[in-house]
Amino acid sequence: MIKIEVKASRAVDFNSQEPLYVKALAWESKLSFDMNFQQVKPKCCDVFVWIGVWRNTIKYWVLSSKEVEKNKYYSKGQHRGNTGEGQLHLKDDNIGEFVKYESKPKELLEKIIAAYNKQPKKR
């Protein structure tokens, strides 16, 4: 059995104070954005599926828990006193580093199994 955690975030104009539905960005936008995947618990699952939503595009990323935990953008301790929980900011200036984790919708199952197989075997 593969334990999967699914998180979603939308790309919005990072510098706007408008309501979310107004500041939502199109994929082609050159404006700064910050998608914050919060309450990420690598010890509680095997695989993460992250969904990024733009006005005209939906992107999927599949990462093993180990890949998240070791990622340089993963910040442990999202809240004071919390252990085993963090967050990762996927932004306009680092999104290119996540291309290797992208998945098309019809490839999700295959990518989930591949990410699971990257995990250390449990005894």
Image (cartoon, rainbow, N blue to C red):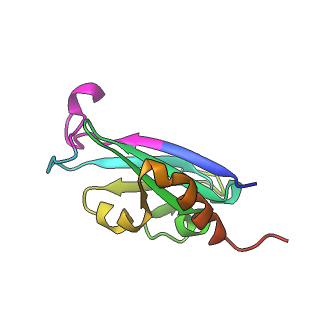
Helix, strand or loop: magenta stretch = loop
User: Vertically, is 32 above or below 100?
Assistant: above
Indicate the quadrant where residue 86 lies: bottom right
Compared across the picture, whether 53 is left or right of 123 comes to left
Q: Position of residue 1 (x, y in %)?
A: 76, 54
In reply to whether residue 27 is colored magenta, the answer given is no
**65 left or right of 104 in image:** right
Residue at the limit of the structure toward the front, as seen here? 106
Q: Position of residue 87 (x, y in %)?
A: 50, 53
Q: Residue furthest left?
A: 30
Split into 4 quadrants, where in the image is the C terminus? Answer: bottom right
Residue 31 higher or lower than 67, as above or below:
above
Q: Is residue 78 left or right of residue 18?
A: right
Q: Is residue 27 visible?
A: yes
Q: In the image, 25: left or right of 86?
A: left
* Residue 77 showing in the rendered view: no
Seen at 66% across and 59% down, the residue is 46
Q: Nearer the viewer, residue 60 or 71?
A: 60
Counting from the top left corner in percent of width and height, residue 80 is at: 58, 50
Relative to 43, residue 12 above or below? above
Magenta-tinted stretch: 8-26
Camera-nearest residue between 80 and 50:
50
Give the total of numbered labels: 0
Q: Residue at x 20, y 36 (%)?
A: 16
Q: Residue 53, located in which quarter of the rendered image? A: top left
Which picture quadrant has residue 76? Answer: bottom right
Q: Is residue 10 magenta?
A: yes
